[in-house]
Image (tube, helix red, strand yellow):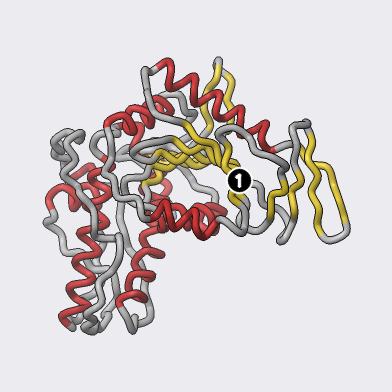
Amino acid sequence: MAQLVKLQDYISRYQVDLSRYPTQFVRLKKSQWERVKQQWQSGEETPEWQHIESDEDIQHSKKTFSLFEKLKLKKEPQEIENIENVDVSNELMNPEEEIPEEETTLFFEPKIVYQPSSIEELKKMFMDQFFHFQIKWASSTLREKSYVDPKFLRDSLLRTILQRLPDSFLVLYYPIVKVKKAPVELDIILLTPTECLCITLVEQENQAVFVGNSDRFWTKKVGKTSKKMLNPLIQLNRMESIITQLFATNNVDIPIRKVLLSRNGYFDYPGSVFNVQFIDKREFPQWINQLSRYSSPMKRMQMQAAQAILQTVQTTSFKRDIWKAEQQEQ
């Protein structure tokens, strides 16, 4: 699963310590998956589910990881793909510092109510539950949290990106950065170990055709109707310009590639545009599959690129004492 390092203007633990949390995320996911898979293969019956104190469990693995309520597990010889093929011994990561027990605040309490019949079904259950946990993980720290709009839990593109892409990919999803003290919302930034993908989403009606040119306006065609729309390359180019400036200021040397994306529509653009890849409904399956097969571990320059962006982002959050008080009132 790709790592969500920044979601809009929500607080992010990756802002606090980018060298620690990518490794911890991978260990958390891998530890829980190994536990569940082992129980499923051995035919054990899990005890009542327990909460997972993530920050401590990631580092010490002292807790018992239980995801399913009294789930009877079956043996299955088939191996799962990608979810366990992770190298967490990345040389660029610093040694993990011990986090005091009283500072563990994040819990993972999935409620799975049906029994998987195959390891692929088990994998889907696990990843769907972990996706919800990942949103919490990406919008909180040990002392702060942000209130996430429920729309992100229903965001199919965000879910696809996080579930399909490797752990070594870092995702900034519509981050708000400060440019000359003014907040600017960017689109989707995907940091792979070797490049930065700036992605602008163009999705409206199903089967819509977006007819483009170099002008300020494009034409959107749906059936027999046509309508003008703002050229989405303007937003894409602005995002690239901002990221380029941030990288130059912070001595980040990593190539930037632009992607115009539509999963439910089509692009009709005569000729080509330098450094822009048009991915529409026809190309999307192949494009996401190609990215999902990427096997390189995280790179130092990739981390520097993420840090260059994170240090400029805008954040809205609440202190942990306020968070606890609200929980007690509820």
Name the residue at 34% across, 33% down: 302
Count of number-bearing discs:
1
Residue 256 spot, x, y in % from top left? 47, 31
Q: Report the side of 197 relative to 102 (left or right).
A: right
Q: Is residue 318 visible?
A: no
Residue closer to the observer: 181 or 48: 181
Q: Is residue 96 above or below residue 266?
A: above
Instruction: Specify whether 145 is left or right of 183.
Output: left
Q: Which residue sits at x=50%, y=47%?
A: 148
138 over 316 or under it: above or below: below
Question: Looking at the image, which is closer to me, 185 or 188?
Answer: 188
* 146 displayed left or right of 304: right
At horizontal 45% and vertical 24% (from top left) the residue drawn is 312
Give the percent coordinates (x, y) of residue 187.
Answer: 56, 38
Residue at the image position 48 percent from the left and 45 percent from the top: 147
Mark 1 sits on what residue?
278
Assess disc 1: are there few (<14), some (14-19) or many (≥20) residues with their C-alpha within 10 Å of its C-alpha.
Answer: some
Q: Amino acid at mark 1?
A: Phe
**Residue 253 vertical placement versus 290 (above, below):** above
Task: Report the quarter where the N terminus lies.
Answer: bottom left
Vertical placement of 124 versus 143: above or below?
Answer: below
Q: Position of residue 26 (x, y in %)?
A: 25, 50
Quadrant occupied by the C terminus = bottom left
Residue 316 seen in this snapshot: yes
**Residue 317: quarter of image:** top left
Q: Position of residue 298 (x, y in %)?
A: 28, 40
Question: Could you tell me which secondary element the residue under label 1 belongs to?
Answer: strand
Query: Among all residues in the image, which is located at the extreme front?
Result: 271
Foreground: 42 or 315? Answer: 42
